[in-house]
Image (spheres, grey):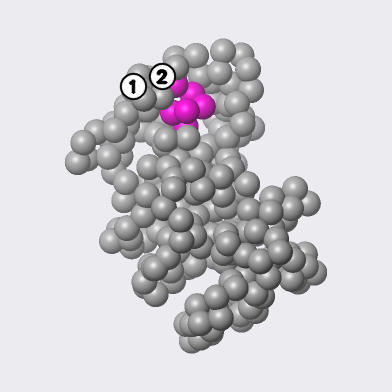
Amino acid sequence: MSRILVVEDNEDLAFGLRKVLEFEGYDVEVASKGEVGLKSARENTPDLLILDIMLPEKSGFDVLRELRTSGQRFPVLILTARSQESDVVLGFDFGADDYVTKPFSTAELLARVRALLRRVQTGGEAEGDSGETRDVLSFGAVEVSPSTRTVQRDGESVELTPKEFDLLVALLERRGAVISRQELLKEVWGYGNAAINTRTVDVHLSELRRKLEDDPANPQFLLTVRKAGYRLSP
């Protein structure tokens, strides 16, 4: 039985999440404050953390940052009522694996929970890595080493989040072919339900452009193909 820690200060939402998750067969613990949730996550490592951003005493961002800094690698799904993309990006930078924006449907939440837990069961962050040593992949001034999970641009190291790296490799391995948002959600995030409505791919692609393109607003390599998906032009 997978153990899920929910850190949410809205009592009604926390109660609803507990009931839904327990009905699906998960072992659920709920904390209403950031400091309490942080303590529980450290002492009783969950298989998945569902973490609200707006929390009393210690924000979800602070909880996430402290957990990742201390080496905790279990998947984290952040809950946010904010619409600003910058807040989502900040969550990813601190080590979140995915996010949902309130209000969200039960079906959508459960689909993401199942996908993140599937990562734990199949080896966590090593998903997509068969263990083979692959050659360095490159485009423009960027060099990517799948075997060491490192990226350099103009000879300088570029820090990518795990999901940014996985997305970049997925695009590179298509050798210029178009890949749809649904395919990327399935391959990189493990979502089997193509009906999920999320801007996760778009946010990560935007961050890749910011870090790897000379002019992120007019990308030369990381391209959007209207009504089709994305491709990386080598």
208 to the left or right of 196? right
* Image position, residue 107 (x, y; %): 37, 72
Residues at circles 2 and 1 in contact by the CB criterion of under 8 Å: yes
The N terminus appears in which quarter of the rendering?
bottom right
* Image position, residue 52 (x, y; %): 57, 64
Residue at 63% x, 46% y is 94
Q: Which mark is drawn over residue 6? A: none
The C terminus appears in which quarter of the rendering?
top left
Q: Nearer the viewer, residue 25 or 207?
A: 207
Q: How many marks?
A: 2
Residue at 51% x, 86% y is 19
Q: Is residue 179 above or below residue 122?
A: above
What type of secondary structure mainly makes up the magenta span?
Answer: helix
Q: Amino acid at mark 2?
A: Asp
Q: Is residue 212 magenta?
A: yes
Q: Nearer the viewer, residue 57 or 31?
A: 57
Q: CA distance from mark 2 to mark 1?
A: 5 Å
Q: Amino acid at mark 1?
A: Asn
Q: Which residues are magenta?
A: 208-213
Local SS, label 2: loop
Q: Which mark is drawn over residue 218? A: 1
Farthest-out residue, front: 57
* Image position, residue 16 (x, y; %): 49, 82
Q: Is residue 166 magenta?
A: no
Residue identified by numbered label 2: 215
